[in-house]
Amino acid sequence: MAAVMIGIDPHKATHTAVAISAAEEPLGELQVRACAAQAERLLAWAAAWPQRTWAIEGAGGLGHLLAQQLLAAGERVLDVPPKLGARVRLLAAGDVNKNDPNDARSVAVAALRSAGVREVRPDDHAAVLKIWSKRYRDLGRTRTQVVCRLHAVLCELIPGGLSKAITAGQAARILGSIAPPDAVAAARCELAAAFLEDLRGIDARIRETRKRLALAVQAAGTSLTGLFGVGPVVAAAVIGDVRDVSRFPGRDHFAGYNGTAPIEVSSGPRKTYRLSRRGNRRLNHAIHMAAVTQIRHSHSEGRACYDTKLAEGKTPKEALRSLKRQVSNAIFACLQADARRAAAHAEGPGDIRWGLVVKLLCGFSWPGWGRRCARRSADRLRGSGGGSRGGGRTGCAGRRRAGLRRLSAGRSGRGRRVMR
């Protein structure tokens, strides 16, 4: 448990910080303007508490930039969901007024007492996927708005309007066939033409964003796209929201996070489960799209699972929910396999070799390379029947000194290749 927990209530213009002790006693309060020096001012204020941890409400939203700045300064930062802070404030005794200092204190208490608060990590490639996934989602919503407005205008020009989805080409043909009889109809045609131009522009941006998503997913090297019904758009949404799959102990926890696990609403001897409306709804929607795609293709394994559930007497919605859970399990397995492959690649001998060369030549190292080297040396000594953990570190240091002598003397062929 942290000796001092500093809760921050971030806003667009200001950030309010409140420091509390392990006994939830207030230690200090500060409000800073959201500017280029915000992190420096907060760090200078918190210098009196060396053993501190920062808790930011919604570190993926308005507090994202501040959280990343504190991480870059070497601080430990926790991400507190807004609902968790609100519950602490609701159940608190005494002053429960809604203001920034009380919100910041509730965030600090929530981070201090809750074991499930996630630690903030530096932005990686998953953040890139999340950015373009959000862009694709926003463009889709904007397109829906434009199409609805175009349908409304066409209903005033054509009796009954159009009963189905409309495309830009279809709308152009319809508008070309309309001869406005008066000025009012001409104005409606001009308005429909403006909506049509907006629709074409949005379609072009959607195609461009889909290409960017495909390139970003390809760069991630994920195996998710090998699942039937999971394309670049769904894969980007999943990776962008999950990021670190190791924070889920198992597939059941992952299903609870994405809302595909049912909720128990039992009472007494009556055991009942119902549909979950909790969890990450963006991730749930991505799983839903993959499941629906599988159902539409009769040769897919998902369709076979769906038909099996129907044959067991399940309703179509119940069969779909069961399939979504199976898709969730498959996605979790792929994410775990990707994580293992990435860890094996990062822990490969090439990383240790190059990290050693960088250490010897430049005087610095990659984070954790020394610990990995010591651990591997100790494991090799144990495997050969002798040595201890301390012996492993001594052997690693000896190899580093020997490598330094070889590089300085120019007798190492590997060292010569690196120098060239």
Image (cartoon, helix red, strand yellow):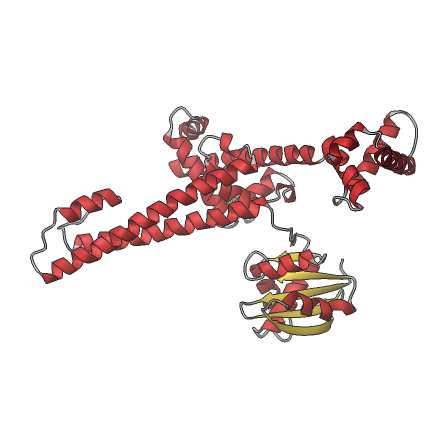
Q: Is residue 154 above or below residue 352?
A: below
Residue 212 falls left or right of residue 64: left
Q: Residue 194 at what x, y percent from top left? A: 24, 55
Residue 66: quadrant of the picture:
bottom right
Q: Is residue 30 left or right of residue 221?
A: right
Name the image quarter holding residue 306.
Answer: top left
Q: Residue at x 50, y 33 (%)?
A: 225
Q: Please indicate whether residue 77 sits to the left or right of residue 155 in the image.
A: right
Q: Nearer the viewer, residue 293 or 274?
A: 293
Q: How many marks?
A: 0
When the figure is inspected, residue 199 is found, relative to residue 324, above or below; the finding is: below
Where does the N terminus fall, quadrant-wise?
bottom right
Q: Nearer the viewer, residue 173 or 21?
A: 173
Tell me residue 11's x, y (percent): 55, 67
Residue at x 38% of width, y 26% of height: 298
Residue 173: quadrant of the picture: top left
